[in-house]
Amino acid sequence: MTTPANVTPEIDAVRVQYLQLLKRILTRTDFPTSHSLVHLRPWRLAPRHLVFSMMQRYLLSRGYYLVVKRNDALRAKGDDWPSDAETMAGMARLDSLQSCVETVIADGVPGDFIETGVWRGGASIFMRGVLSAYGVTDRTVWVADSFEGLPAPDVEKYSADAGARFHKDKQLAVSLDDVKSNFARYQLLDDQVRFLVGWFKDTLPIAPIETLAVMRLDGDMYESTIDALGALYDKLSPGGFVIVDDYSIASCREAVDEFRLSRSITEPLETIDRNAVLWRLSS
Ligand SMILES: C[S@@+](CC[C@H](N)C(=O)[O-])C[C@H]1O[C@@H](n2cnc3c(N)ncnc32)[C@H](O)[C@@H]1O
């Protein structure tokens, strides 16, 4: 980023520090009191996990979570489900998100930002924080989620989602009120944040979004990924970014690869970390 003429080095340093602090808090990086949720591993559901998952569901229905002492290395990489952080992503993915947002602001790439699949909202909160740090008032952060977890797989339509069990995991269902409270906790809930509530297949095709500069997809499944790409990709400005958080999940990867092939997208995929990738639409 180049520094605008009216921004002193001191203001710039405070902005860098604010965004660094925001990322560290949203991810709970270096928070030793934070734990990791014990969760179903739907892609690895072996018989020995069944007893455990029944026990977990029983506890969840009574408002208890199982947590384990967290592994700092996993948290740093965004490879666990944190007990209290507002995002599952680790620092590498938020660093990359910051770089995408700063780049489109610096290059004047027109459009809003969207996250499809927000969970507790942390990555979207961070995008709103970057806008705030740069005093950008003419872009919106769109926050798209069912706010009730993932859909049951529609295997007739999307065979790649066969066996997906994410919909069983109530820890992935975070209510709209909770996500709004999370934005408010960081004093980042205002009219530059708009919520698209419901299944992507219903909300995204009719969303009143004109243009996008950054789209961050984090819906885990084939259906959730292809619905987002199909409804939103044509709204992406040249120079804009597509970020796919779940490229390490086979069904998500299949959706991305098929979409890129069907649309003859040749911009290279860049690796963010072992889970996530991005590409930038040519200008
Ligand atoms: C892995 S979590 C997202 C993690 C989040 N981006 C973060 O930074 O921590 C997946 C989210 O996607 C939502 N989701 C997945 N598929 C969806 C769909 N088809 N329609 C609506 N919401 C969906 C779920 O409700 C859940 O909140």
Image: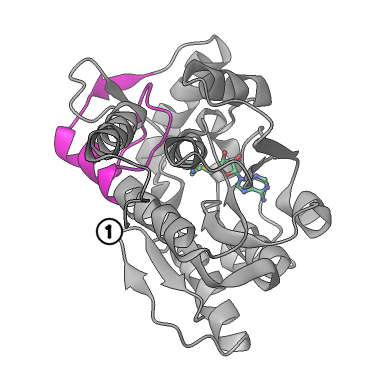
| 78, above or below 201, in the image | above
Name of the residue lying farthest toward the front: 6
Point 52% across, 63% down: residue: 108
Q: SS of the residue at dot 1?
A: loop
Q: Quadrant of ligand 1?
A: top right
Give neighbour class at mark 1: few <14, some 14-19, many 20+ (Cα, 10 Å). some
Asked where in the image residue 193 lies, by quadrant, the reply is top right
Q: Nearer the viewer, residue 116 or 163?
A: 116
Rendering coords of residue 255 (x, y %): 56, 71
Residue 103 relative to residue 159: left or right: left
Q: Nearer the viewer, residue 224 or 38?
A: 224
| Residue 245 visible in the snapshot | no
Point 56% across, 29% down: residue: 170
Q: Nearer the viewer, residue 29 or 134?
A: 134
Q: Nearer the viewer, residue 139 or 165?
A: 139
Residue 223 relative to residue 277: left or right: right
Rendering coords of residue 227 (x, y %): 69, 62
Asked where in the image residue 262 lies, by quadrant, the reply is bottom right
Quadrant for the N terminus, please.
Answer: bottom left
Q: Is residue 176 magenta?
A: no
Q: Which residues are magenta?
A: 66-92
Q: Is residue 84 magenta?
A: yes
Rendering coords of residue 159 (x, y %): 63, 69
Name the residue beneath numbered marker 1. Answer: 273
Point 54% across, 44% down: residue: 166
Amino acid type of the residue that numbered disc 1 sits on in the rendered structure = Asp
